[in-house]
Amino acid sequence: MSDLDDIRPAATKNTRRLRAKAEGDNQGNVMAGGPEEMTWRAQLWNNVIANPFAWFLLVAFVAAEYGNWRLGEKLDRVCELTGRHDFAVTNPRTDREELDNICVERESEMPADQ
């Protein structure tokens, strides 16, 4: 008996499984029905919900959006406190002209009801 006899049964199983998968036999797949027949919920679970990196990216996105919202509120407050900003200047030379440009741009992006 050679050393290959110990290895051969596992290799044969894998070969049979791969051959069955290539031929389209679902018995060779680990999941019943195979990945192409998985429901969208199972695919969502396997690809997104069970993936910690996806959760990290979601939390980072939510934190960035919250930070942007807070900074936008502060910038709106600064524009209110510095008075009227009637027009923008093409090449601002002073801080006041730069502030006018920023505030005029923000006022044009705001909805009409605010």
Image (cartoon, rainbow, N blue to C red):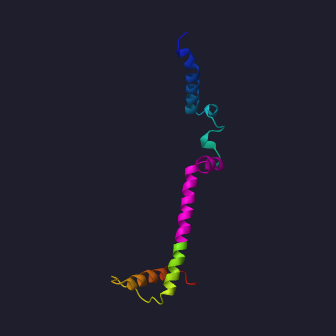
- Displayed quadrant of residue 18: top right
Image coords of residue 1 (percent x, y): 55, 9
Q: Residue 3: say if magenta.
A: no
Closer to us: 34 or 103:
103
Taking 88 as reference, is 35 left or right?
right
Give residue 27's position: percent from left, percent from top: 64, 31
Q: In the rendering, at what x and y percent does residue 2 appear?
A: 53, 11
The residue most toward the top is: 1
Nearest the eye: 63 or 34: 63
- Main SS of the magenta segment? helix
- Quick check: is 48 in the magenta stretch? yes
* Image point (57%, 17%), residue name: 6
**Residue 113 falls in which quadrant of the image?**
bottom right
* Residue 95 found in image quarter: bottom left
Q: Nearer the viewer, residue 95 or 60?
A: 95
Q: Quadrant of the C terminus?
A: bottom right
The residue sitting at 54% across, 77% down in the picture is 73
Name the residue at 44% across, 90% down.
Answer: 86
Marker count (numbered): 0
Judge by depth and name the residue closer to the eye, 46 or 25: 46
**Range shown magenta:** 40-69
Q: Is residue 31 left or right of residue 83?
A: right
Give the percent coordinates (x, y) of residue 57: 54, 56
Q: Is residue 29 above or below residue 62?
A: above
From this view, report whether residue 91 is shown above or below residue 31.
below
